[in-house]
Structures are given as structure tokens and as C-alpha cells.
Amino acid sequence: MTIVELVKGFAHDLSTGVVVTDANLNDPGPSVLYVNPAFERLVGHDAASLLGQSPRALQGNATSPFTTRAMGAALRAGQPFHTCLTNYRADGESYLCEIDIRPIVNGRGKIEHFIAFEREVVRRRVRARPGMNTRYKALDPQTEVEAAGILAASGCFASHLD
């Protein structure tokens, strides 16, 4: 069973966007191997137009270069990376996206793929509470349910952005 078949088995029906890429971080970036239907809805592209492309194609003028450099450094070091950044949909509309990226390693410890969990968020305008992620809130309540349930074992969206 390939990683794509394995991920498709659990991610197809999630409301959280899921992307699997290869591990090539050199320009033009990793190639998309799989996206679930929730990711297609999030970005406004169908899977066929995303496969083989780099997720970098979703970035634009308002995407933070600092964040993308930090992301690349973490992934090159084999570390997971959790952030919010501005991405762009197929129609050019920008949106704030919370992304949790994890390396997938083979039996020898070599990174072979990356998996990213993505959801659209809005900024909250409330005071931070200790131990709570109060800075960002998912637009789709179902992604919150998944993050606390089926995705909780992976630690997806577990780190705080405050």
C-alpha cells in the first residue's frame, strides 16, 4: 500500500484539508501527490489541477516570506511545522490558513513525504487565556471537532499560535 492510498483511506471524508507531497524542497518545491475533497473546496482547485504542482502555487503577495523561510528550514531539518499564513484560492481571493505539516519517514528514518492538515481560520479579537488557542478560530466548526477527535492522536493543530 502506498502512502497516498493509506492517507486517502482516512482523509477522504474529513472536513479538514489534507495534502500529501513528495519530500523535494528544492525549487519549485514539493509536488502534490494527493489532496482530499476538503482541500479542493478550501482552495477552489480540483485535484487534477493540483497534482504534480507545488503547494507554493497557492502563495502570493500577502504570504509572509519570513513564515515560508521558517517553514522550509523546519521541514529541511525534519521537524513538523505549524503556522498560519495567507494563501490564495483559484479565483485570487486571499484567505488565512492554519497549516500543520508533518514529515513522513521511511523505516530508515529518511523523509519520503510530507503531510499537511489545513483549515481556514479567522482572527479572534479576544484576550488570550493560558493554555488556549484564542488567537485563531476555524471557520468550519467540523474541523475543530476533527482536530479534537480523529486527528488528535497525530497532534494535529495541537501547538498554540498565541
Image: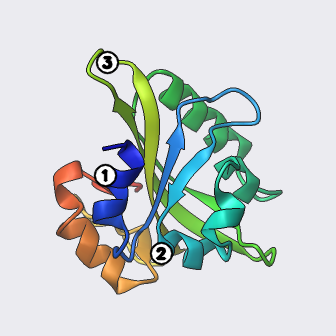
Query: Would you say the residues marked 2 and 1 are in contact, meaning their CB atoms lie under 8 Å apart?
Result: no
Q: Residue 109: which disc?
A: 3
Q: Give the quadrant of residue 14.
A: bottom left
Q: Residue 6: which disc?
A: 1
Q: Which quadrant is the C terminus positioned in?
A: bottom left
State whether residue 125 appears in this view: yes
What residue does disc 2 label? Answer: 38
Q: Residue at x 53, y 44 (%)?
A: 21
Choose the circle earlier in sequence order: 2 or 1. 1
Q: Residue 68: which disc?
A: none
Residue 69 in the image: x percent, y percent? 65, 34
Amino acid residing under circle 3: Gly
Q: Secondary structure at mark 2?
A: helix
Q: Give the quadrant of residue 46.
A: bottom right
Q: Residue at x 26, y 72 (%)?
A: 146
Q: Secondary structure at mark 1?
A: helix
Q: CA distance from mark 2 to mark 1?
A: 17 Å
Question: Counting other residues with Cα less than 10 Å from the Cα at mark 1, is it few (<14), some (14-19), or many (20 or more)?
Answer: few
Q: Residue at x 46, y 82 (%)?
A: 139
